[in-house]
Amino acid sequence: MDLLGLIIGAVLTLMIFSYLLRDNQLYRWALALLVGTASGYAMAIAVRFVMNEWISLALSEPNTSVRMIYIGVLLMGCLMLLKGFTPTRFTGLIMTLSNIPLGYLVGVGAAVAVSGALMGTLIPQVLTTGAELTMNGVNGLSDGWLTLVQGIVIALSTIITLLSFSMNYKRGAGTGQEGGRRRGDRWKRTCRGVGQAIIAIALGTAFAGTITTALTALMMRLWYLADLLSRWTVLIGG
Amino acid sequence: MIRCPACGTQNQDDRRACRVCGTALPQTKLRCPKCGALNSVGNLFCDQCNTRLVHAEDTIPPEEPESGEEEFPTSAVKGISLPSRLPSDIAEDDESASDSLPDWLSGLMDDVQPLDDAAEDETEETGTPSWLLDAGLDMTGNIEPQDPDEIPDWLRAGSVESDALTDESEDEPKALPDWLAAMAEESEPSLPEADDAYPDETLPDWLRGAGNDRSADEMPATADREPVADAHYEIVADDEAPVGPTEDDKEPLIFSESELPDWLFESQPEASQAAARQPASPSAGDEPADDAIDEMDNADAALPDWLLELSDDTVEDVTEDTAEEAIEALPSWLTELAPEVREAEAPDIAPAADRILMPDDGDEAVRLPTDEAPSTPDVQVSDDVPDWLAGLDLARTAPDDSFTGDQSIPAPSEAATGDILEEEEATAEPTWERLTSSDEEPAWLRGLRAGEETTEDTAAGSVFLDLEPTEAPVAFVEDDLSGTQPIEATDEIPAWLRDLDVGASEPSVDDVDTHDTATPPLARAELPPWLEELAPPEADDTGASGFEIHEGAEEGARQPRVSGSLTPADIPDWIEQLRPGPQEEGQPLPRRQMVLPTPAEPEGPLQGIPGVLPSHAMVDMATGTDEEPAPGPVLAPPLPESVIAQAQLWQQLLEQPRSVERPVAQQRPQRAPHLRVMRWIVAAILVIGILAAFWLVPEGLVRSLQPPLSAAQGAPGTTALVEGLDRLGPGDTVILAVEYTPAYADEMSQIAAPLLEHLNTRDVEVLIVSTLPEGTGLSYALTPQPRNRQTLTGSDYLAGNASGIAAFLNRSEAETARQLIILASDPQRFGWWIEQTTLHNQRRADAEMVISAGVSAATGPLVTPYLRSDIVTGWIAGFPQAAMYRDARGSGTGVGGTSLLGILTLAHWAVAALLLVAWIANLINKKGGG
């Protein structure tokens, strides 16, 4: 059974690799199989979760009041299904009822997300950015000045990158505006350029990680094939 | 823009003069003084602001009808609409009309008292025409002559029994004669034509002035009509005006009942009526009754002079000379109108008054019609025919030329107009001859009597009947009642008159009945050339309007054909030029014939002429084929060569058949050959490089390529992670969040493997959860599997993303967890876990959960802010750091060991090299391609 799985995996791997030549039907079949399997598995998990976690729990709740709450919540979930209907003369009023649970979800999600983003993202990252501005050696750097320079660079890069998204200046306004263009717009253009450069470096770094991930996946697949081939060879060769 | 006609300069639309030469420009636009918008020249108000552009005084105010405008008197007889004139207009035109009127007629008009209010009121009340009022008669029957002597006897008879001719009188005519009643019953539209065709000057005097006993409805519609001035009429001065008999002197005239219209007959005294009822003697040579003669003589004494003159002439022995003299004395218009008498073929119709005497210029009145016998065997005059009526020459011709009554006569307007009479005046030498029988009577007169009997067939106002143009000219001779020999036609009779083929036979009743009721037949008159051109085409054989080619007609006069075909119309010269002429073979068509290929007219006056529209140089024309050549000449427009080339190219493109073998949706675009080669080269490098790392490159070389970096330098989070996991003890709960998709399963499994091995060595309980549905399934593919794996009640799937995480952290299972290890390939989900866990830790200040992370190489740079912060304690980003983690723990090399790491290193070098080569090639191509 493991061997059969290996073989199927190898075949599917080769079918995906066939895209290197050109788009073909084998690649599409393998891709459709992967997408379909994942979607099907996800649907099964979701349905089992809803059935087991919510419906059965709601119905098996001994406390009536709690049960009613569960049932109320389930009904609100059912109202969400009305969002899938096409607005017509008859379904227009019904579709407005689905806005109630939708609004509740959006509100709760926004509350959770905002609080978490504030406490878990913004504040910690701001503090981290400023934490490098110290003479104490951090992040493996023993020299305080190097740490400070590193911290300054990080802080300035962060600030300049954020400012580059809000910098707007006039382009080529013609005679009479040349003076203003020289003074007011120069530092804006500089800030914008530096910010774009930093963003480019960050994106390059991200691209490098993406290449690493892709090469890792390729390597692992080839290793898999090689391993299978060696096993077949051993099996055939005895 | 307006182009100056002088210098050709373009000027603005609102300029009045050229800005260069000052020439006045045609105004094409009007500028609004208020808003400045340009408006069309014809606008009175601005289109934009509605400001008046043209001053009110500059515009011609529309004519408004006057409130007190006098109205045209309407016809008292229903169905009759005779041309009418306002009394004021009549008074105004008196002077102008009097100059052209004959003396005898002008004399009558002078006697007409101006219509004062009383007269007008009287006229309006009674509806009596002014001319009749002059005679002292009104429609109410009251005879109030201004001058009793002016009223002729025949007109003085009886009282007029009539209703008031008022506008309110809309009743049917009560006592209309048949012929006049027929006019009323026929269509109204025809009546005006008939009325217009029969102006006063065309009616005989006895008819025009008669009607003393007619009812109001029987009177003509225009009661106030006045005889239109005619050159052939003479207005007699007051002192010359014939003095009609007074009422006391009035003696009845004797007419035959069938001869006279009812209205006229009724006006006669009873004795006269009784005598008139005696059958007339249509045969030639009958002696008129002595009584009638005496009565006529008595009546003559009361007639106006002008009428007496004519009548005296008829009493005298008519000889050729006298007849000729009499004819010469007649006005030309009268002689022209006098039809030629032919032998009567239908003696059924009782002879009407055969004597028609028209007053001539300066002549005295013609004797009234009498019933004297015709002077000649051929031309007979009934005893009842007045003298003046008998004066018409009805010289007989061949019996075949008798009047049949089938031929229609053109509208009187065409046959008898003042202009026509004027033209023929000089040539006419009328002679009078008594009409002795109905056969000799004029056709128009015959028609009158026929109309009396047939009320339906006689057209309105028809006086003239169908007449056959005669070959011989009609001679008007003055005949007496003694029946002298008729005077033959002379050469002096105009040609148009000769054309009138007045049949000798009288129209029978049946013939009359067959007439078209629309229009009465008229005697054909000689028309001037300009009028002949406009003459309508000859009608069919039903007898509507008939023209026959007659001899003796003036040259150049249009010769209408007999019914059955259209009269050829004169084709203008400019169209005639377009008629294709004889073309020689091989000779190109003349330029004027190069028209659009429209088919030539197959018939008609434009037969043979193709379309006359001028051809346009840019119009494409059919060239035809060899089998079917173009219907007409083909133009060769002078098109430029570029246009011709483009047209030919389009034609070639359209002629090319579309390839059926090439499905557009499926076929991929053709790539350049060098691009295909590059794709193969890249694929080969990747495959060879990877394989070579396994079998071709020695192990030492692989190791030498690895950077000599320590784990602390290469992976700063690896050490903290190792230390954090080392602090775990047995029974501790570690939450493992699987947040990656199957696509990242190979890499993440390499990252998760050393962590799981470490956790297994620490003998902790691992709770695997995921916000992805497939995450829990992927957790079962991890190797090694956690030794102490815990599961949540229900499912390990956390629905709701961040809310699900928050809800999970509030559960009891999460309350006891000491560390959270996040295995994520998605930065967003990683952030959700970080955020919610941070919030959870803030609520649980005493027992915070340590957060560790294991992310893919792609996710690492994106989540570095989280990793660099104090929130995350230890992390692994990518396969290389995972290898370092193993090295740091000293747990071995894992699956593939260093080989995989070497291969990954070589792959990185290969990719870097490819990127460098592509960048250099892009620079080269960019510079070269521009």
Image (cartoon, helix red, strand yellow):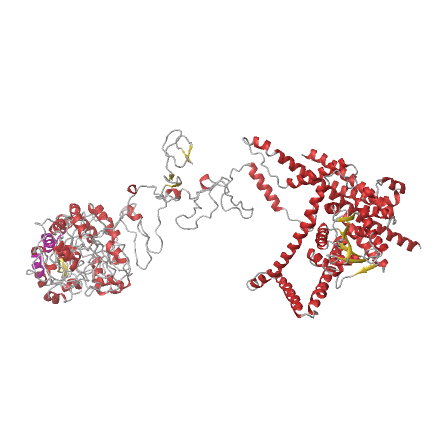
- Residue B116 percent across, percent down from the top left: 13, 53
| Quarter assignment of residue A88 | bottom right
Is the N terminus of chain B in the top left, top right, bottom left or bottom right quadrant?
Answer: top left
- Residue A52 percent across, percent down from the top left: 72, 66
Q: Along the horizontal axis of the image, is B80 left or right of B869?
A: left
| Quarter assignment of residue B354 | bottom left
Q: Along the horizontal axis of the image, is B544 left or right of B865?
A: left
Q: Is residue B108 above or below residue B700?
A: below
Camera-side residue of B525 and A215: A215
Camera-side residue of A27 and B376: A27
| Residue B213 colored in magenta in the image | no
- Residue A25 percent across, percent down from the top left: 75, 53
Residue B262 visible in the snapshot:
yes
Q: Residue furthest front?
A: B846
Camera-side residue of B443 and B23: B23
Is the C terminus of chain B in the top left, top right, bottom left or bottom right quadrant?
Answer: top right
Counting labels gives 0
| Quarter assignment of residue A205 | top right
Q: Along the horizontal axis of the image, is A142 left or right of B803?
A: right
Q: Residue furthest top?
A: B21
Camera-side residue of B363 and A24: A24
- Residue B539 percent across, percent down from the top left: 32, 56
Q: Residue furthest right?
A: A238
| Residue B317 colored in magenta in the image | yes
Residue drawn at (23%, 47%), measured in percent from left and top?
Answer: B419
Q: Is residue A18 above or below residue B249?
A: above
Main secondary structure found in the magenta portion: helix
Q: Along the horizontal axis of the image, is B352 left or right of A187?
A: left
Residue B485 visible in the snapshot:
no
Provide the residue span drawn in magenta.
Answer: B295-321
